[in-house]
Image (cartoon, grey):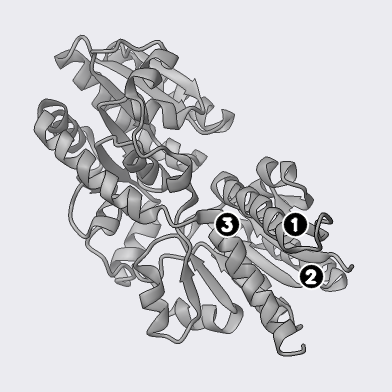
Amino acid sequence: MEALRVAIVAGEASGDALGGALIAALRERVGRDGPAGVPAAIEFRGVAGPAMRAAGCEALADAHELAVMGLIEPLRHLPRLARLRARLLRQLSAWRPHVFIGVDAPAFNLGLAGRLRSRGIFTVQYVSPQIWAWRQGRVHRIARCCDLVLCLLPFEPAFYARHAVRAEFVGHPLADQVPLTPDRAAARSALGLPAAGTVLALLPGSRVTEVQRLSAPFIATAVRLARRHPDLRIVAPMANSAVRVEFARALAAAAGAGPLPVQILDGQARGALTAADVALVASGTATLEALLCRCPMVVAYRVSALTARLVRGLRLVRLTRFSLPNLLAGEPLAPEFFQEAAVPDNLCPAVESLLADGARREQLQHSFRAIHETLRAGGAMRAAQAVLALIGQRDAQGG
């Protein structure tokens, strides 16, 4: 029996996690549907991080090579990324996969998908770009490059339907991984935090550039709060060693402003968010994780000054809200502060208001649970089923 060949390209840690879960689900689904007692063979090659490698993907390059962001920042990486994409195109074209799956990283993956699709290979984009929020014209490129878009958010397929693009909501894998009823007491115990104390979590981002821009205002905010609330405990989970170095540098630079009793963690974001009363979070996947952990939050984000000017000057953004909890709810569940508004004078009162208002925190936790239940739609397994259904189309048509 011929092995099913799946090319899969993921960028950075979040894409690697999604890719690893999808690979495992595809293995399970293909094995289940194969001949009795003999799992059907399936092979994976592409751009992979540790999760995808552990799931059995042959890495042609490492996922961290695609970890670039913004409008301006990626420009200096263009020659390197163009060489990588050309190499992958040659390798994957020679391998002839049955399907190509681009996990997030649309700036890189859509170009690769379009070229592979022109060679008769099915193409899937797993994680929709936020085209419903900004640069909506990109939907036409997606239509040219992709046979299927797998959406993590329930409102996204309707946007694609208006543009005749095949899209399916598969749920967010994080929603399946996080229990519907988080155990705060257990999380605090695991981190050595007091059962009844007040805990603030700081999550300044998973990329070095994010942490460079947000660490200083986050730390200054925490210093102010610690002065007013001497019993406040602060935890700061770091996504990787590189961002930990940047955060430690910012802590050292702020030492003159006063002591900060912060417990820096390697990873453990989910435990920290479950343990915390309130979180100060960089906009991104961490805001969704905070929601799933039932942690009320204040959200901030900063980009380069040039990127901010372009976004505003060209009116690229179509939404008044930018954090995932607010987009999913359709209402402002979390205070948001962008660019020059992300300063301690704004962040400190917003965090303090949540710390002081237990009723508001309880109300937010109820809203977060309702969203959590909506996002629990099967995640990786549903995505695997959609991919296999797409591949099965060709067999059904005799292709």
Residue drawn where x is 42% and y is 78% of the image: 160
The local secondary structure at tag 3 comes to: helix
Residue nearest the observer in this picture, 115 or 372: 372
The residue to which callout 2 is attached is 97
The residue type indicated by label 2 comes to Pro
Task: State the residue in front, 113 or 338.
Answer: 113
Residue shown at 23%/18% (left/top)? Answer: 198
Residue 180 position, x and y percent, is 36, 39
Amino acid type, residue under disc 3 in the picture: Met
> Which label was assigned to residue 349?
none
Quarter holding the C terminus is bottom right
Q: Disc 3 marks which residue?
A: 381
Disc 2 to disc 3, how far (Cα)? 20 Å
Q: Label 1: which residue?
A: 31
User: Which sits earlier in the primary sequence, circle 1 or circle 3?
Assistant: 1
State which quadrant residue 298 falls in: top left
Can you tell which of label 1 and label 3 is closer to the viewer? 1
Q: Residues within 10 Å of mark 3 (few under 14, many from 20)?
A: many
What x and y, as percent, mark residue 82? 70, 65
Disc 2, SS = loop
**Which mark sits nearer the N-terminus, 2 or 1?**
1
